[in-house]
Image (cartoon, rainbow, N blue to C red):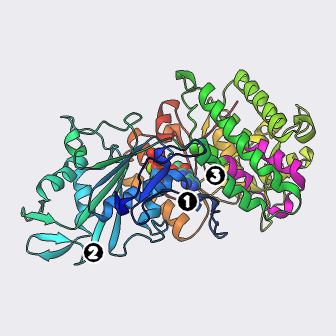
Amino acid sequence: MANGSNCCLPTGNNGEDVYSFRFDPDSGKWKPWMKAGEVFEIDSKLSFSEIVVPTNDSVRNTYLMDLLLMNKKHVLMVGETGTGKTVNINQYLLGQSTVDDRPINENCLPINITFSAQTSANMTQDMLDNKMEKRRKGIYGPSAGKQYIVYVDDLNMPKRETYGAQPPIEILRQWFDQAGWYDRKELNIRKIIDITMICSMGPPGGGRQEITARFLRHFNIIGYTELSDGSKSLIFQTILANFLSRIDGDVEDVCKPMVKSTIELFNSIVAELLPTPAKSHYTFNLRDLAKVFQGCLMIDPKKVNGSDSYVRLWVHECKRVFADRLTNKGDLDWFEVKVKGLMKDNFQMEWGEVVGSESERLIYGDYMVPGADPKYYEQVTDMAKLKSTIEEYLMDHNAESKQPMPLVMFMDAIEHVSKIARVLRQPLGNCLLLGVGGSGRQSMTKLANYVSQFTLFQVEISKGYGLTEWREDLKNCLLNAGLKKKPTTFLFSDTQIVVEVSERSERALRKTRVRATATTKTNLLNYFCSIAALVFR
Ligand SMILES: Nc1ncnc2c1ncn2[C@@H]1O[C@H](COP(=O)(O)OP(=O)(O)OP(=O)(O)O)[C@@H](O)[C@H]1O
Ligand SMILES: [Mg+2]
């Protein structure tokens, strides 16, 4: 091999295998993907959802992606949901991740397309045609010397037509096979040059379809495996340690046990609380794990008062992310026993000493001082004051609103308001409220929206309300939230949902910064699999 080196397969010391190394032809040696002991510096300006920590898997996949794309080979990334496909590809295409310390070639220009069940062949064709320049007669492409990298996310989402084909995929296949497609007005063939495709998709199931092998054969396929526990703890330890380093005292010591406990808790929930027809929303993935840490980072470092108080916040965030989704007492008890065990084993702390007695409510919120700026996310200990504060908010709301709500506030209802307000304060926060009719899902959301000082946006379904109206409504909502920077709550209920519409809203939710709460039918849960669910008991 290169340099005549003795090229035996590498052996790792810590259980690494051949996939943990790459061969470096220059030195003739096997090198690990990541330099040992290297600590990733987090830019303090980034919000939680923008932090991406390199791991062995992500560095390896980015390297392979770079190698293939730079040699104009098409790539398809396949992996379970939440394995970081979208994040890794976007980071690479935006030049934010490097391979051998260099970002993507500057002559490569990314085009992003996300497929959904409703994407049509014409839409796909128009999206690409709009970006192309005329190079010669009948030949189109990026400007000379450039290369378009077309990134198609969720490739296998498009719905099948009558005969079983997926039109957006067929039009792309036509490009692969015939190097172009027809101009639909002129009816001339348009050849398209200098594009390379990168696609990503999850395995078939839950709205995702099986894709024809005639299309797949054009790609080099890279599989994304579920993140290993090592990678998960690397990601979250880096993020948490960076945050805790800003806190005085010995709070930093809780970093390792906190990450370890959360991963252990997550693994046992995934293994034991399985989805069944009655609990179809028991679907937990990496995004939920991340939300626990997102919650732990919401507190202001100056407000942390020793490790006990930080562990209390951790218990609260685990309850919000995991326990709020559980529907019966058996599961809730199981959860509590699990957390108690983890506190004892990993933190050497007793539940009673840190969290308080069984009957005490654990509530955090930023609403206790109305009109405060900035708002601090803090534990609420005085329940009487909490009740009076929320009642005051309600009175103010009723005085201002055209639709006053005659609500009686009791502790369970207040807790729900607090839980919704917590979701609203998170960037990209969204929440699915499940409960029987009349359990107060809409009114609590309206109140939480008022408490958080957000603008409430609801669509009004009248006779003849169709996709055009829906698009117009959604556009207005997004313009308000994105352009005018008005924090907006998008509330929609089961009576307003038409299946076709909900799938579109799901896409909007993933891509925008509108906080949304939905009160929907359980059979629409598939569309909201990644949304935190909150059960109204
Ligand atoms: N290396 C990483 N560092 C930080 N966060 C990560 C990393 N990898 C994944 N995540 C987090 O995991 C979550 C899921 O990632 P992503 O959206 O890329 O998954 P996906 O594989 O595209 O899933 P889907 O198939 O559902 O689209 C994101 O919220 C992201 O922030
Ligand atoms: Mg994705």
Query: What amino acid does circle 3 point to?
Result: Leu
Task: Say whether residue 460 is magenta.
Answer: no
Q: Residue at x 90, y 47 (%)?
A: 381
Cα distance in 3D space between marks 1 and 2: 32 Å
Q: Residue at x 18, y 34 (%)?
A: 163
Instruction: Tell me the residue that label 2 is attached to.
Output: 146
- Residue 75 lies, in percent from the top left, at 32, 53
Instruction: Tell me: 63 left or right of 306.
Output: left
Instruction: Tell me: 434 left or right of 212.
Output: right
Task: Say whether residue 308 is magenta.
Answer: yes
Which circle marks residue 234 in the picture?
Answer: 3
State which region is magenta.
292-317
Tell which residue pokes out farthest to the bottom in this image.
144
- Residue 104 lies, in percent from the top left, at 40, 69
Instruction: Looking at the picture, tell me which residue is in the foreground, 312 or 68.
Output: 68
Instruction: Tell me the residue that label 1 is attached to.
Output: 513
Earlier residue among tags 3 and 2: 2
Instruction: Kindly state the secondary structure of the residue where label 3 is placed.
Output: helix
Instruction: Kindly state the secondary structure of the residue where label 2 is placed.
Output: loop
- Residue 29 lies, in percent from the top left, at 46, 58
Q: Residue at x 70, y 41 (%)?
A: 262
Query: What amino acid does circle 1 point to?
Result: Arg
User: Which quarter of the figure is the N terminus placed in?
Assistant: bottom left
Crowd class of label 1 (few under 14; some 14 to 19; many from 20; radius 10 Å):
many
User: Which quarter of the figure is the C terminus placed in?
Assistant: top right
Q: Residue at x 50, y 37 (%)?
A: 495
Q: For the stretch drawn in magenta, what is the main secondary structure?
A: helix
- Residue 312 lies, in percent from the top left, at 83, 45
Cα distance in 3D space between marks 3 and 1: 27 Å
